Image (cartoon, rainbow, N blue to C red):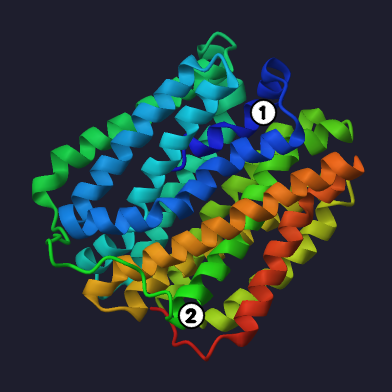
Amino acid sequence: MRVTLLAVPPVLPLIHRDLGLTETGIAVLTGLPVVLLAVAAVPGALLIARFGARGTAIIGMLLIAVASGLRGVATSIVVLFGATFFMGVGIAVTQPAIPLLIGEWLPGRIGLATAVYVNGVLVGETLSPALTLPLVLPLAAGRWEWSFGIWALLVLLTVLLMAWLAPRLPDASGSPTMAWSPDWKRAETWELGLLLGGTAAAYFGANAFIPDFLRAIERPQLIGACLTFLNASQLPASLVAGLVGAGGVRPRTTFLAVGATILGSLGIFLLRQDWALLLGAGMLGFCCGVALVLCLSLPPVLSDRGGVHRLSAGMFAIGYSYSFVVPLLGGAAWDFTHVPATAFLSVGVGAVTMLVIAASLRAPRAVA
């Protein structure tokens, strides 16, 4: 679900050069799929109610593959943004289906199952920034547009595997009478949404602005390494979260620790030394990985079978709406002040949001 999304940051300088995007435009390009994760999350819940969780996941993944492939013919801003729009829709309708499937497949090991799922997503997030410049871009004859098409082939392969294995997997089937709209009056909907929003604002904001920030401070040779550290560090984080989850995790304590550590990692990163840039990026990615596993593991724990997709859709709608706006403000701050470090306002705001919401959580139970 994320391999095509994170294929953008490594080639942002090339897109910047060829299409003449401002820093605000870069923020929109990287944030557009994120806001669509919010806008299309509720329609995704409707699809789940009608076609079942597995069927919705297959439909969404197919849309990701086709739309990302269309970005491979992007010769204008209109084509690039249009294809990115539909790719974001595909990701958005897929995501609410996963917590429901996890609850059906492994109801007694939700924390561990969520960690395994997130680990798979993070493998995709790690492959694209790590391999785009040294491997995929040369295969694409140096064309950043074609590199998107190459990554789309992996998503298409996943769709084919899911369709082939579908008869062997249990499903959370939909029905015409199944409720689908999120309960906007439920406190957990907003708490989980803002916790996810803080996590995503820090993560996507860092991915969006690290490349141009490093160019601005004359460290372009560290772009690939910093993006790799940021994304690859989430892999061990998801494994650690899964192992710890087997013994029970206190969400309030974990979110407080993660928020504080994100602020510390940002301080280290802005020291601008080579070692600090890599260490700060790695710490930030690790924290976001832990928080993401915890956010996604909570809907199956807090809802019965018929309400998981509703709580998940509400969480995604709120969280990704928030995480779209915050990095956009960071890009605008850079354009206005011409101070590169102001772009990382999104990371600081995301961390503070997590701290504020976690401090007000009402003693949630541990997640196994």
Q: Nearer the viewer, residue 333 or 69?
A: 333
Relative depth, front residue between 132 and 296: 296
SS at circle 1 = helix
x, y percentage for residue 13? 71, 25
- What residue do we see at 44% from left, 69% from top? 243
- Mark 2, secondary structure of its residue: loop
The quarter of the image holding the N terminus is: top left
Q: On the picture, is 328 further left or further right than 220?
A: left
Q: What residue did someone put label 1 on? A: 12
Placement of 115 over or under 119, stated as above or below: below
Q: Which residue is mark 2?
A: 249
Displayed quadrant of residue 348: bottom right
* Residue 66, horizontal then vertical, whole percent: 35, 27
Q: Would you say residue 339 is visible in this rendering?
A: no
Look at 72% across and 55% down and name the residue there. Answer: 346
When the figure is inspected, residue 199 is found, relative to residue 352, above or below; the finding is above
Judged left or right of residue 142, residue 298 is left
The answer to which image quadrant residue 322 occupies is bottom right
Q: Residue type at mark 2?
A: Val
Name the residue type under label 1: Leu
> Where residue 217 sits in the image (x, y, percent)?
89, 36
